[in-house]
Amino acid sequence: PARNSSDAVAVIGLGRFGASLALELMAGGTEVLGIDPVESVVQDLNGKLTHVVRADATGEEVLRQLGVAEYGRVVVAIGSHLEASILTTSLLLRFGVKDIWAKAVSEAHGTILQQLGVPHVVFPERDMGRRVAHLVRGSMQDYVDLEAGYALIKTRPPSSLIGKSLGQADVRKAHGVTIVARHPDGGEWEDATPSTVLASGDLVLVTGRKRRVEAFAALT
Ligand code: ADP
């Protein structure tokens, strides 16, 4: 186990999702213990994570020996093996691990994990499908589903706002959204203020209730 176990993260299941998450944590300077029962998976990640162990995480003794309970944050990235996902997660809950993140592959799987008491259940395929749908539709260049019915999007501003300051256009009142930042054609992202004037070719970051940001993007 990592010396600084409270800051380190244990990632159980190193499939496409788990491996990508683990590598991203490493890239950001977080120590990672990776666990997967498949030898080739473990070999691929050997040397790229702080520790990589070939093990079946459904074994209570295995988790104890690896000191997984001492990790402040544990990610269960086992998707398609439903039984293994549920068994591993219940063991972690029994050990008293507080910050558990578990991947669900279906709504039913997610409901079970939530009922067990997992604080963070993520639905990568469902969420990515939704996000890409917005991109395919074409009115947005990025879409991030936030909690509680809010979203953050990247889009072009509607032509009605070009040449006006955000304060003058009263964007919040008129559209029910907040423009957070602006990217002029060929320039850099800058924070938006009431005196920001939008030009054609700009991109904007917009946040607000999903319905409102979707309607805003559709005006483009
Ligand atoms: P993805 O869609 O992200 O590739 P999968 O659900 O297909 O996710 O893969 C999950 C990973 O979890 C696989 O690499 C698999 O070997 C691993 N895994 C399956 N059972 C266990 C287990 N009991 N303990 C730890 N890892 C497991």
Image: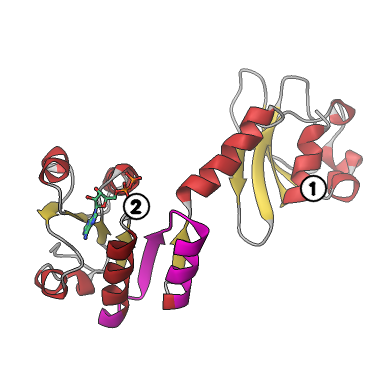
User: Can residue 203 be seen at all in this image of the molecule?
Assistant: yes
Horizontal side of 155 relative to 36 (left or right) equals right
Magenta residue check for 132:
no
How was this image coloured? secondary structure
- Asked if residue 184 is positioned above or below residue 18 in the image, the reply reads above
- Asked if residue 123 is positioned above or below residue 200 in the image, the reply reads below
Q: Residue at x 32, y 60 (%)?
A: 75
Q: Position of residue 22 (x, y in %)?
A: 28, 48
- Asked if residue 71 is positioned above or below residue 35 in the image, the reply reads below
In the picture, the quarter occupied by the N terminus is bottom left
In what element is the residue under mark 1?
Answer: helix
The magenta span reads 94-115
Q: Position of residue 162 (x, y in %)?
A: 84, 26
Q: Position of residue 155 (x, y in %)?
A: 69, 32
Mark 2 or mark 1, earlier in chain: 2
In the picture, the quarter occupied by the C terminus is top right
Ligand 1 within 8 angstroms of badge 1 C-beta: no
User: Can residue 204 be seen at all in this image of the molecule?
Assistant: no
Q: Quarter of the image holding residue 129?
A: top right
Q: Which residue is mark 1?
A: 212
Amino acid type, mark 2: Ser
The mark found on residue 56 in the picture is none
Ligand 1 within 8 angstroms of badge 2 C-beta: yes
Determine crowd level at label 1: few under 14, some 14-19, many 20+ residues with C-alpha closer than 10 A. some
Residue nearer the viewer, 70 or 129: 129
In what element is the residue under mark 2?
Answer: loop
Q: Which residue is mark 2?
A: 80
Horizontal side of 98 relative to 48 (left or right) equals right
From mark 2 to mark 1, how far is it between C-alphas? Answer: 35 Å
Which of label 2 and label 1 is nearer to you? 2
